[in-house]
Amino acid sequence: MGSKESVLIIEDSPAVGMLLAEFMRKLGYTDIKTAETGRAGISLFKQFVEKSITPLIFLDYNLPDSTANSIMSQILSIKPFTKIIIETANGKEEESIKEVIGLGAYHYLQKPIHFNDVEKIITILEEEESYLAKKSRQSDAMEEDIDETKIAERINFIFQTNNQVSLNKIIEILGFSNNFIESYLKKLEKEGKIISLDTKKEVACNQCDSIRTSQVFFCPNCKSSDFKLGKLIEHYDCGNITEENTYQNDICPNCKKEIKALGVDYRVMKNHYMCNNCKDFFPEISTNYICLKCENKFRLEEARWKSSVNYKVVNRQ
Ligand SMILES: [Zn+2]
Ligand SMILES: [Zn+2]
Ligand SMILES: [Zn+2]
C-alpha cells in the first residue's frame, strides 16, 4: 500500500518542483519523486505502479516534451483511479484547462503556488478517500453521517476550482445525493454567488452510469498515448514531412536542399500530433473514454448521456 504517502511531481521548473515537494513534506507525505519531463514522469509513475503504489500526481500543464493530454492519457490508461492535480501558469490558459478538467483531472492549482491552496486540495482529497473507504465498508449510502456544514464547505470548494459545474458532477464529486445539496445550491443562487444555466449533457459510463469519466487519447495507427503536439514542415520537392526542428538552417533533412519560400516549395503544418512511438503524425488524435469509477473503457458511440442543471460561478470581484 503506502499510496497515501507517495507523490509524483512532473514539473520542468526545478524551483517549483522543490517548493511543491517541501509543501507536501509539510503535509506529511514522505515518498516524493520529481521529474522534469513528461517522459521521465511516466517512467517514474510506472516504477511506483510496479511496487503497487499509486502516487498522487502534480502535473505541469506546460511541459516542453509532451502535452498534458498525452501524459494524462498514459497515466489513466495504467491506473484510472490516479488523482492528478494540474498546475497552470495563469488565466489565459483557462480554456484549455477547462478542457483538461473535463477530461478527468481532479483539480487544478494556479501558479504561483501557495501553501494554503495545496493544503486545501489535499484535505479534500484525503476526506474523499476516507469517505470512500468508509462507504465501501458500510455498503449503503450514509449521507446522514456527514454534517451539512461540511457538505457546504465542499460545495464551495468545488465552485472555487470549477467555473462551471453541473449538478450531476457535484453529486459525483461528493459521492452522494441528498436534499441538502439542492437546497444549498438554491441558497447560493439566491445570494447571487452562482447562476443556473441551461441543462448540461454529459457522457456517462455505459456500465455503471457514472459521469466521472475521462477521455483517453491515442495514436490512430499504433494506439500509443505517447505523443506530442507540434509543427511539421512538408518539403514539396522530395515529399519529406518531419518536425520543424529537423530542418536545421533551413536544410531539408531528407534531400539536403535548402527550403526557400513558404507556400512555394514548402508548407508548415501547425498543430499536428506526432506519435513518439511509431513516428506517424495526424491532424487529429483518436479518443476513447475511461470510467474513473469502474475502469470500464468505451467509445463515444457507446456512451450513455446524462443531463442536469449547469451552474456558473458569478465573477468574484
Ligand atoms: Zn463505470
Ligand atoms: Zn527535401
Ligand atoms: Zn503511433
Image (cartoon, rainbow, N blue to C red):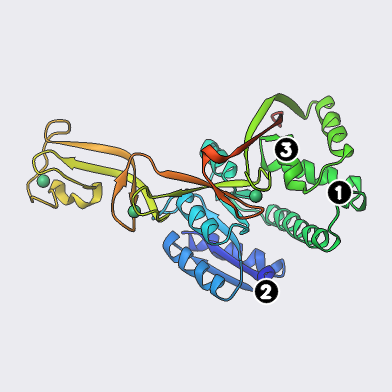
Labelled pair 1, 2 in contact (Cβ < 8 Å): no
The residue identified by callout 1 is: 150
Q: Nearer the viewer, mark 1 or mark 3?
A: 3
Q: Nearer the viewer, mark 1 or mark 2?
A: 2
Q: Quadrant of the C terminus?
A: top right
Q: Is residue 277 left or right of residue 9?
A: left
Lower sequence index among marks 1 and 2: 2
Q: CA distance from mark 1 to mark 3?
A: 19 Å
Q: Is residue 89 left or right of residue 244?
A: right
Q: CA distance from mark 2 to mark 3?
A: 32 Å
Q: Residues within 10 Å of mark 3 (few under 14, many from 20)?
A: many
The residue positioned 72% from the left and 38% from the top of the image is 168
Residue 33, x across and y down, in percent: 55, 70
Q: Secondary structure at mark 1?
A: helix
Residue 17, x across and y down, in percent: 54, 62
The residue positioned 86% from the left and 49% from the top of the image is 150
Q: Is residue 49 left or right of residue 238?
A: right
Residue 153, x across and y down, in percent: 82, 45
The residue identified by callout 3 is: 168
The residue positioned 59% from the left and 71% from the top of the image is 32
Q: Residues within 10 Å of mark 1 (few under 14, many from 20)?
A: few
Point out which mark residue 112 bears.
none
